[in-house]
Image (cartoon, grey):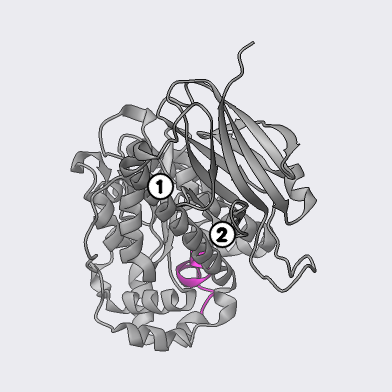
Amino acid sequence: MAEQADGGDHGEQAPVHFFVHIPKCGGNTFSDFLARQFPLEKIYTAEKSTAAWEDHRRDIAARAEQLSRENKGALLRRRFIDGMRQHDLVIENHYTWDIAELLAQHRPLTTYVVVREPRERVASHYLHLRRIPVETAHELAPEGRELYGFAKEASLAEFCRTLERPDIWSTVFNRQTRTMSSQIVSRVLYEQCDKQAFLDNALANLERADFVADIDDLDEFAQLVSLANGWLPPGRMSVLNPGKHPRSETQDLADEVPEAMVDLDLILYEAAKAKYRSWKQRVLETAAIDRWQQHSRGELARPEGDTWELGFEGPLHGTNFHGREGAPPSIFRWMGPEPTSRLFVPVRPGVAQQLSVFIAAFIDPDVFLGVTYRINGVAAAPVCSVEENCTVATFAISPEDAASGAVELCITAPFTASDRDKGLGSDIRQKSMALRKLRVVPTPTA
């Protein structure tokens, strides 16, 4: 999850919030949402980037010497970066991941990516080009007239078959994967490159991005981004650039897009959806824990005396556990289905003490060999022993750890498995370790 943002002026140590705006993926709508969080003077808008591009085009035209396409691109990127690094939010224009990597050399980044079903994105982009009047092509880029005119004359199937044209290839061929690549790839360079390495690089960049979602989840995405960043909720998102065509037409046209044109995008798209599902779960879990800590952590019932034991008969102050099993006084709970479980344990405030975890069983002995622990977020190594037919892991709790009157114990198993996986029965629940009770005692004095 990204660090909380407040849109304030913190200099170049504060992150730039950078939106990787893929064409026809809800970019205008999401840009508008992000822009609400920052003052206008801190936003690198389309107007600012267009002005930089226009200055670049005029400078290139005024040069006596001819520059290669690569050198022209490098000069334009340098001009963009010089402008971006003075701002806290970069939105609206169609910047690619390689621009983000260049900007990251100057300031830390928080990155946002919205993707779309690849065939539908191609169909939407095609319809968008058909809507643009030919005469509105920018005077410094008159070549746009040919692209807009051809889109008006050709069917989508014909459009997709004309990949020998660089302007069409760059518009529709695996556009989402190319956007997420660290490489600037023309059609010629793409045909010469290692396709698997190219895809792997884009997927790795997608994994590095802080916030990723499918356009179909845009409303929910904005809500969760607000929750993660500590922003006010946006309300329902309004579509700023819907076009004149109903989505059903776009979906019908998408059937005409050849799979070979978007084969890498289809892989990237599935990876993005999987990343979103995992991130969504983490955001909601973190928010629930934060709210619980605000309202309940200080009210954890602490038994009388200096020493106490806590079983699993009562409410569970933790996450990622299966239901109670066994009979009193030997109630236990299996950790799972995820590898990491949390427990919030009441302790005496500001006093050195010991916390012991009684482990009744392992789904596999190797689980115990690879398990790791954290106390209040810091790695901790237990002293292990055997007691009451349990493996006991005992941790030293410092007065600083106990300052709030509760500690967070995080236990991460190396893997989970089910009884059925291990050939022990028909139970399909994913489990790692079964915990029976916790014990808190004062640290023995020398």
| Secondary structure category for the residue under label 2 | strand
Q: Position of residue 312 (x, y in %)?
A: 54, 51
| Secondary structure category for the residue under label 1 | helix
Q: Position of residue 263 (x, y in %)?
A: 59, 73
Q: Which residues are magenta?
A: 162-176
Label ID, residue 43: none
- Give the residue type that dot 1 points to: Ile
- Give the residue type that dot 2 points to: Arg
**Would you say residue 143 is visible in this rendering?**
no
Query: Is 163 colored magenta in this rendering?
Result: yes
Q: Which residue is mark 1?
A: 289
| Corner quadrant of residue 385 | top right
Whether pointer 2 and pointer 1 mark residues with C-beta atoms closer than 8 Å, the reply is: no
Q: Which residue is mark 2?
A: 324
Nearer to me, 182 or 213: 213
Q: CA distance from mark 2 to mark 1?
A: 21 Å
Residue in the picture at 63% in, 52% down: 330
Tell me which numbered mark, 2 or 1, is placed earlier along the sequence: 1
Query: Are there few (<14), some (14-19), or many (20+) residues within 10 Å of tag 1?
Result: some
Q: Position of residue 388 (x, y in %)?
A: 71, 42
